[in-house]
Amino acid sequence: MQQVFTKAMARNIFLGGAVFFLAIYLALTYDTWQRIPIRDHADQMTPAVLRGKYLLDTNDCIGCHTINGEGAYFAPELGNVYKRRGPDFIKAWIQSQPTGVPGRRQMPNFHFTPDQLNDLVAYLQWLSNIDTNNWPPNIQG
Amino acid sequence: MKYQSQAVAKPYFIAALALFVGQIVFGLIAGLQYLYGTFLFPELPFDVAHMSHTNLLIVWLLMAFMGAAYFIVPEEAQTELYSPKLALLTFWVFLTAGALTIAAYLFVPYAHLAAITGNAVLPTMGRGYLEQPLPTKIGIVLVALSLLFNVTMTLIKGRKTSINLILVGSLWGLALLFLPAFYFPQDTVKASFGWWWIVHGWVEGDWELILGALLGFILIKMTGVDREIVEKWIYIIVAMTLVSGIVGIGHHYYYTGAPSYWIWLGSIFSALEPLPFMLLIAFSFKMLLARRREHPNKAAMLWAMGTPIMAFLGAGLWGFMITLAPAQYYMHGTNFTAAHGHLAFFGAYAMVSLAIISYAMPLLRGRVANSAAAQRWEMAGFWIMVLSMIGIALALTGAGIVTVVLQRAAADPMPFMQVQDKERVFFWLRELAGVGFFVGLLVYLRSFFISGEYEYAGEMKRALAT
């Protein structure tokens, strides 16, 4: 086998395979890029939604929570929290942090203004309408 | 050590191990916060402990990879490193930037850090593993450019072995794959899709090439097996990595808003991702059996043989468990993923780093191998760390099972925090295993402080006497 299957052949499979599958991936990515705005209703990304997203990012929310399953597993899923809790509960909850209950996991208070809370909720509402192939399996996330 | 300039690898390896200690400390803190949520709050919220834990992991692995590159590339190229001074300067820049970044995490609130580092101009912060402020990210690119320049110039003027071509090529890939960190689309689904170019591209693609090159180098040196055979195996292994892994990225796209065809594509190709790890095991043990010499550095051989097995367990087996779309529907975003992440990062990348450190450090300290006593400490550290990490993975898997049963697949699903309460026993087991791991790390580090080199005559006498 050593004579039949040489190192040069192995190298060519490596290079050829890499180029071939990279080309396939790039073509699929191009197609995905066209479809994502439809699946996540990108036309509904209002300035408030984008401001809310910026607040989520710059306060490292995914350092504890998940968004569509991605992030840390310390605190509940945010992708569908709008549907689970509704806007008023979410705002009241964020404002009342930290609970200070002994031993319970604590969320910091980020001192958001009422406008910022509205932006956050707008973003969470937009998130909850993304077509995620019916994930999560139920409202508990 | 064949070339003087290989010595620049030493500070990289030492710093890697120091940062490794830091990573474990933050891991223990974060793990304890799962059980006592008020522990160190509000001084050190969970997210800060968590990002310090994951970022230190990345930084110490990069330190180890860079040290490995500065050690291996000159030896393979059979020439001195192009610029040892640049390599040393780069080391201090990287270490300082890394330390400043962790200090900023600890002492500056994240939103404030974003405000003072220009995140509004070019948003990059707030993504997993990529929490670093903009100046740090730019610093990482500069450090990578310096490394690439140095090793590429060394390669150009020297011998071009396949090991070296794969190693230097994959370092270029590592740097290129980091560039999407500067592209953070406002569309969350696109942002998640692109985030995986970096994370999946590194750990399920490019870094497997680095792993292959490092392991190939170690085995050529330690077993004396013909280079042509080793390099052919490595090419086959890394070919399988990319054939399965490039489209296999689809297993991150099932439930994040990407089109449904990824469910099929991701399931089929990612199901093949364990194959390169199986080949890696076959290769390593074949080389071990075909060895033409008995290398006195038994500890390095233990790391080299342990790496493919643990990488297969963590990346291959635990990865496969959550990769098929119907299974992931229930397991996505649970501690199943954390179990896989811990075992795979440790089994593949931490262990191959410790393998090259184990092989190279004695040489950098002027001996072929450490004394038998030092090696006993190192091998004890190996076993304690490996078994503890398996314990961490099993405990997190237990927590994942509870989430799936009570929260994801239940007829009457329970809320997140109630489910977390039911998992306390597993979080305790994880924390205990974490303490075990820390003890293993200290035992391992102890081996560096036992002086002396391997004494052939003494060891032979002892072996004959028993």
Image (tube, helix red, strand yellow):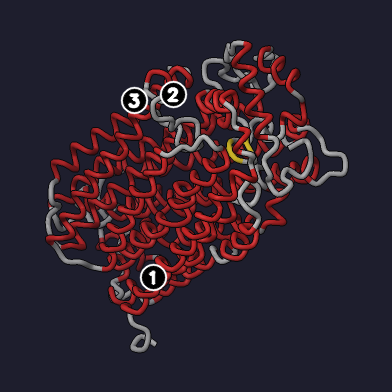
Residue A14 is labelled as: 1
Tell me the residue that label 3 is attached to: B100
The residue at the point 54 percent across, 42 percent down is: B192
Mark 1 on the same chain as mark 3: no
For residue A49, above or below residue A96: below
In the rendering, at what x and y percent does residue B60 appear? 37, 40
Report crowding for label 2: few under 14, some 14 to 19, many 20 or more residues within 10 A (C-alpha).
many
Classify mark 2: helix, strand or loop: helix
Q: Secondary structure at mark 3?
A: helix
Inter-mark Cα distance, 3 to 2? 9 Å
- Inspect the image, locate mark 2, and give the three-letter code of the amino acid beneath it: Tyr
Comparing marks 1 and 2, which lies closer to the viewer? 1
Is label 1 in contact with label 3 (beta carbons under 8 Å)? no
What quarter of the picture does the N terminus of chain B occupy?
bottom left
Mark 1 and mark 2: span between their CA atoms? 41 Å
B427 up-or-down from B114: above or below:
below
Are discs 3 and 2 located on one and the same chain? yes
Mark 2 chain = B
Q: Is residue A133 left or right of residue B239?
A: right
Chain assignment, label 3: B
Q: Is residue B457 left or right of residue A36?
A: left
> Would you call the spot at circle 1 few (<14 residues within 10 Å), some (14-19), or many (20 or more)?
many
Q: Position of residue B391 (x, y in %)?
A: 60, 46
